[in-house]
Amino acid sequence: MKSLRDPKRRPTHPGAILREDVLPALEMTQTEFAQRLGVSRLSVSDLLLEKRGMTPEMAARVAKLLNTTPDSWLRMQQAVDLWEIAQNPEKLAGIKPIAKDLLAA
C-alpha cells in the first residue's frame, strides 16, 4: 500500500500526537496523564517533547488508557525511526549484503 505522506517530510512522532491532539482534547495535564499511566512525569514529558521514543510498554499503557491499540502507537514510532535512519545512509554504508547463495544454505 502506497502512503500519501511526503517521504521527504518526517513522520509525526507519537509524542506530538499526544501533546497536540490528545491531551488538549482530554483537558489533561502531563502530570495527570503520567499518573493515569502509572509512569513518571519525566517519562511523559520526554515522550511529549520527542526526546524519547514510544516503547512497547508505553504503547500498551497509552493504548489501554485511550482505548486504542498498542500497534497503532508503535507503527507511528517505527515510521519515525525508519525515516531517521534513511536520513543518515552513511550509518549503514559499511554493511555489505550477504550473497544470496550463502543465505540459501
Image (cartoon, rainbow, N blue to C red):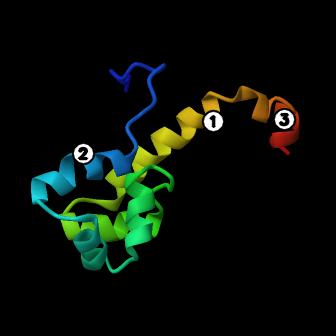
Q: Considering only vertical position in the picture, is 55 above or below 14?
A: below
CA separation in Å, label 3 and label 2: 38 Å
Q: Tag 2: residue type?
A: Glu
Q: Which marked residue is nearer to the observer: mark 3 or mark 2?
A: 2
- Residue toward you, 45 or 54: 45
Callout 1 amino acid: Ile
Q: Position of residue 94 (x, y in %)?
A: 87, 33
- Horizontal and vertical percent position of residue 79: 46, 39
**Rendered view: 58 above or below 9:** below
Observer-nearest of 17 and 57: 17
Q: Secondary structure at mark 2?
A: helix
What distance separates the C-alpha of mark 3 from that of mark 1? 14 Å
**Percent coordinates x, y for residue 68 in the rendering:** 22, 59
Residue 25 placement, left or right of 3: left
- Quarter holding residue 65: bottom left
Which element is circle 1 on?
helix
- Name the residue rendered at 24%, 77% in the picture: 36
Relative placement, left or right, of 93 versus 4 is: right
At 38% from the left and 22% from the top, the residue drawn is 2
Q: What residue did someone put label 1 on?
A: 85
**Which mark is drawn over residue 20?**
2
Quarter of image, res 90: top right
- The numbered disc on residue 95 is 3
Front of the two marks 2 and 1 = 2
